[in-house]
Image (cartoon, grey):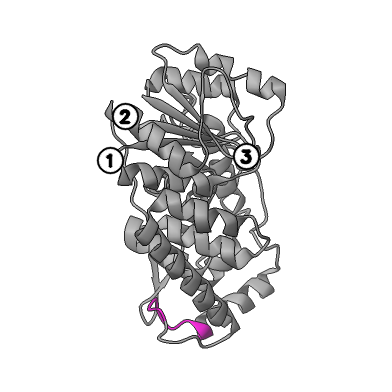
Amino acid sequence: MTLTVAAVARRLGVAPATLRTWDRRYGLGPSEHTAGAHRRYSSTDLARLVVMRRLTLEGVAPAEAAALAATTAVADGGFALASVSTIPAAVVEAAAADAAAVAGPEQAAPGRAGGPAADPRAGLAADAGPVAPAGGGTAAAEAAEQADDEADEADDDEPAAPRGLDELQDWAVQSLADRFAEEVRARGAAAAWDAVLGPALTTDDAALHEAVARALALLPTRDDERSVVLAGLDPAPRGPVLVAAAAALAEAGAGARAVGDGVPVRMLAAAVRRARPPAVLLHARAERSPAQVAALAALLAVRPAPLLVLSGPGWPAAVEGCERAASLADAVRRCAAAVHA
């Protein structure tokens, strides 16, 4: 199975420009060629992009997500991922399962890739039972789709001007993304999030959501020895805020390691105990119950004790032992101060 850029974009629900960005910045591009030098995505290429998309949605920094996605490999009927200690096992396993789900029956035979590992994050693999290709169409429909893609896309170069409805929509989204990126350059990542990007994500406009994702995907982050741990406590993915926080910390000369969203506090406490960060930023959008707030005791008991900074509207006005930030910019300022103390 090989697919064009347009076909892969439809399967993943992202814009073709996003795929080109991932290719340019991280090398996650098509590896197959056809007559006329058309570059096409193989099953393994697609699996890597699925992992990249899942991890970034879970709040993993794009560079870190790309490093893990690049290790995705088809082996013994499954998808193996290399060890990444800063990403929760559940998140990596979910990404591997997503990758297996796009393989199609011919590569999704039952079994596990790689051998057993002592550490649950080492050599992770997802069971890959027979799964129909994403999109659910027949072979004839797949062939028709690819033929249509080939007619629309002569090569990987971006067109000079929109040529159809899909390209017009993509052009409009990219224009929004460029404006968002300009806001980040003018204000800084955290202030731009508070004023523009965050409010855009409170709408139901898919174009705005995609534009925010594109703008954030281009922001540099860093991972230092004294990196801040970032976590979202909402069960639904709210990854973009963690990407914005990581970029804002990089602007302040501090590193960041995102552990994603929906991670139980007890698991987060274990990760913090191993990483020994100077600060932990916890973001919550949905209102936290008294029991959920009380669960922070597990983090407060970690030694050496990191600074715990709470951001987002889900927290009460004050939580004993924690610092309550009024905005993402405020949260980043407090965390950066702890790093440089």
Alpha carbon distance from label 2 to label 3? 24 Å
The image position of residue 184, as x and y in percent, is: 40, 58
Check if residue 332 falls in the magenta segment: no
Q: How many marks?
A: 3
Q: Are marks 3 and 1 in contact (CB under 8 Å)?
A: no
- Vertical comparison of 299 with 19: above or below: above
- At horizontal 42% and vertical 15% (from top left) the residue drawn is 305
The image position of residue 100, as x and y in percent, is: 57, 47
Image quadrant where residue 34 sits: bottom left
Mark 2, mark 3: which one is toward the viewer?
3
Check if residue 152 falls in the magenta segment: yes
The secondary structure making up most of the magenta span is: loop
The image position of residue 78, as x and y in percent, is: 53, 42
Residues 299 and 56: in front is: 299
Q: Amino acid at mark 3?
A: Pro
Which residue is the site of mark 1?
Answer: 253
Q: Earlier in the sequence, mark 3 or mark 1?
A: 1
Q: Are marks 2 and 1 in contact (CB under 8 Å)?
A: yes
The image position of residue 268, as x and y in percent, is: 52, 24
- Vertical comparison of 172 with 114: above or below: below
Which residue is the site of mark 3?
Answer: 313
Residue 121 visible within the image: yes
Q: Which residues are magenta?
A: 151-158
Q: Secondary structure at mark 3?
A: loop
Which residue is the site of mark 2?
Answer: 339
- At horizontal 38% and vertical 37% (from top left) the residue drawn is 333
- At horizontal 64% and vertical 18% (from top left) the residue drawn is 294
Residue 69 left/right relative to 337: right
